[in-house]
Amino acid sequence: MPGCQSAILEPIPPLARYLSFVATPGADLRGALQELPALVDGAHCVAGFGHSLVARLGSGIAGLRSFPALQGTRLTIPSTPADLWIWLRGDDAGELFHRARHIEAALAPAFEPVEVVSAFRHGAGDDLSGYEDGTENPQGDDAVAAAIVGEGAGAPPGSSFVAVQRWVHRFDLFDAMSRDEQDAVIGRRRDDNEEIDDAPPSAHVKRTAQESFEPEAFVVRRSMPWSDGPRAGLVFVSFGSSFDAFEAQLRRMAGIEDDIEDALFRFTRPETGAFFWCPPVRGGRLDLSALAR
């Protein structure tokens, strides 16, 4: 079985840079994509392909689809598809800048960058709100089962599906809450990260408790904070063996099941949303053989 892009199962790095591309109409896409295996090792650089790009290449990946735009009672969760997604990992902002620049040059003019986001680790892996992110991430074999496609599952074994959203926080709204209100929004106490037994049903941890779904909705989160001037938030990144678990959580957050919206929406909203398929790796190089047919 081919290996997965190993960074999917590794802790978040000190720094990251996310690149989203759209394909140029009429361009030689396959010629440009021949550059990727030499640029993407899966450890320091992760790549994902959007549904529209795979279809344009005349190929198909079982389970790959477009991000759903959802309409809740009072909010809209947007879908902003892209053709290609790159996640660069490292510990030097300048080095990440140059790696991103080289990738953009290698893919031009067939692919045009539409969003570049620089992100960073905060504390021990916290959101900028101060609450720990990814507390319920599965570990070890459970993480592999949640995030990586196995044999006979339809998509190429060793691959993964990733949901990516850029959330923007309103810190004026967050700061206006008392500490007890903030804890109730999350459903955990910030001081010790313990769940609050009597948290309201709108609390984020209750909305997204992975074991509370049928079937259980486990994902592997690799989210990181971002900031650009006064604007800041979280790049939410969720890897799965399919998109089903993520979609189940997102629908519940939006209140589509029971009209109870996740309390997170009191101070943060997603501005983007896209799905990608992350190919497996063979011999330390991205395996794009599934796109050849």
Image (cartoon, rainbow, N blue to C red):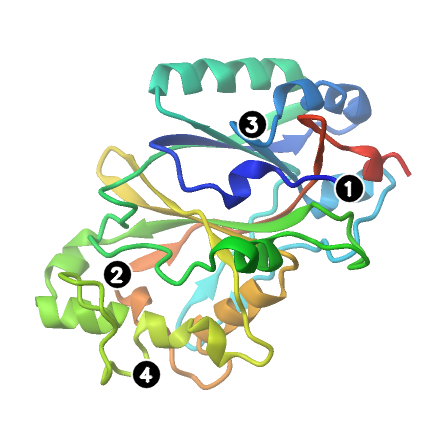
Question: How much space separates mark 3 and mark 2, taking CA atoms?
Answer: 29 Å
Disc 4 marks which residue? 201
Disc 3 marks which residue? 113
Which residue is found at the position 88% from the left and 34% from the top?
A: 292
Q: Position of residue 100 (x, y in %)?
A: 50, 20
Secondary element under disc 1, as helix, strand or loop, is: helix
Disc 2 marks which residue? 267
Q: Position of residue 216 (x, y in %)?
A: 55, 74
Res 108 seen here: no
Q: Are marks 4 and 2 in contact (CB under 8 Å)?
A: no
The amino acid at mark 3 is Pro
Question: How much space separates mark 1 and mark 3, taking CA atoms?
Answer: 18 Å
Question: How much space separates mark 4 and mark 1, taking CA atoms?
Answer: 40 Å
The amino acid at mark 1 is Val
Q: Looking at the image, is 221 positioned above or below residue 57?
A: below
Q: Earlier in the sequence, mark 3 or mark 2?
A: 3
Count of residue discs: 4
Mark sitting on residue 54: 1
Q: Looking at the image, is 54 positioned above or below residue 254?
A: above
Which residue is found at the position 71% from the left and 27% from the top?
A: 24
Question: How much space separates mark 3 and mark 4, taking CA atoms?
Answer: 40 Å
The amino acid at mark 2 is Phe
Q: Are marks 4 and 1 in contact (CB under 8 Å)?
A: no
Q: Earlier in the sequence, mark 4 or mark 2?
A: 4
